[in-house]
Amino acid sequence: MPSGDEIRDVQRATWAGLSAGWEKWDSVIMEQLGPVGAAMIERLDITSDQQHLDIAAGTGEPGLSIARLSPKGRVVLTDLVAEMLEVAERRAMAQGIANIETKVCSADDLPFDDSTFDSVSVRFGYMFFPDMGKATAEFARVLKPGGRLCSSVWVKPEDNPWTAIAMQAIATEVVLAPPDPNGPSMFRCAAPGCVSALYEGAGLRDVAEWDVDVELVARSPEQYWEMISEHVSLAVAALQQVDELARDRIRANAIVKVRAFEQDGKVRVPGVARGIVGTKPDASGTRRRGRAASSNAG
Ligand SMILES: C[S@@+](CC[C@H](N)C(=O)[O-])C[C@H]1O[C@@H](n2cnc3c(N)ncnc32)[C@H](O)[C@@H]1O
């Protein structure tokens, strides 16, 4: 079992390498993941002066959408990888969002005081943390009493053909070792109740899970393959094991398979994510401030 430092080093190198792909395919990725961000924001009770922390913020979502909804508030975007946060800063500037700051740090060791934030979000980050329990304890520590934590993870690969098609094509050429259940991987938190148990272990209450449908929309089967092979962590890692000729065969195989999802001149491949929300107990037992804004994640 690799140490926490070794896991962080691998994740740092992986996501620094993926950052260009995430920036290149920004509009397609954000359209696909937007419904998940919107569903998370809806459960966070965002007000116009929210103090919010986005963990594993990557290229900025859902933190940037929350900053837009909270013009008198402040959103801190954090990630292990500076290159991902640099993309987030460019996206914020392009969208005219100024009430954000960025901080490079690991989810399991946060440089913030206790009870600093009204809410914390973690979209598709949990599965990459070296110690998910320690990270959840950190989220609970920095939340104010009554504040909410909301995260999202992927459900099982069979319900996510948008990645499964690519991984099946790769498996025709590469022997893919089963992922270490205790190590980072895209589907590590797929089991129902996995993240809820972490929330409850950290003392959060009113924990609930729900599913969110997503759809990856590409212009063509060729574009589908290009984007998957340039930004999906599992696929990029597996493709590093093959030569040019094998890569061409994998590409051809994936393109044939994804044609089954062609519709109205586009490729539309479905998937399912799971959202998880919980609340830090308030000593008085009362709920905090009422909600002000409606949500929309971009
Ligand atoms: C799939 S991306 C999610 C980005 C963004 N939240 C979104 O949904 O578009 C996963 C992010 O987790 C970050 N990450 C990996 N390990 C981490 C850790 N230990 N602490 C904080 N972030 C981490 C990666 O750098 C990457 O930006």
Image: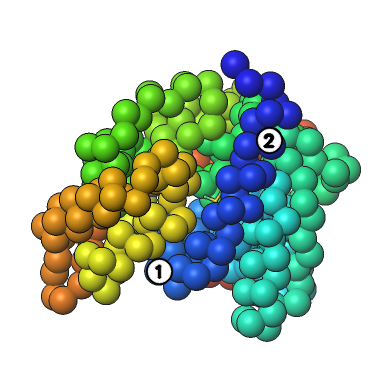
Query: Which residue does the image show at 35% across and 63% down from the upper left?
Result: 226
* Residue, far right: 113
Q: Is residue 105 above or below residue 270?
A: above
Q: What's the CA distance linking mark 2 and mark 1?
A: 27 Å
- Sequence-wise first label, 2 or 1: 2
Q: Is mark 2 within 8 Å of ligand 1?
A: yes
Tag nearer the camera, 2 or 1: 2
Tell me where residue 9 appears, x and y as whole percent.
69, 37
Q: Amino acid at mark 2?
A: Arg
The quadrant holding residue 84 is bottom right
Q: Amino acid at mark 1?
A: Val
Label number found at residue 185: none
Query: Which residue does the image show at 85% across and 45% down from the upper left?
Result: 112
Tell me where residue 126 appears, x and y as whole percent.
56, 38
> Which residue has dot 2 on it?
8
Which residue occupies the foreground of this view, 193 or 257? 257
Label number found at residue 28: 1
Which residue occupies the foreground of this view, 270 or 184? 184
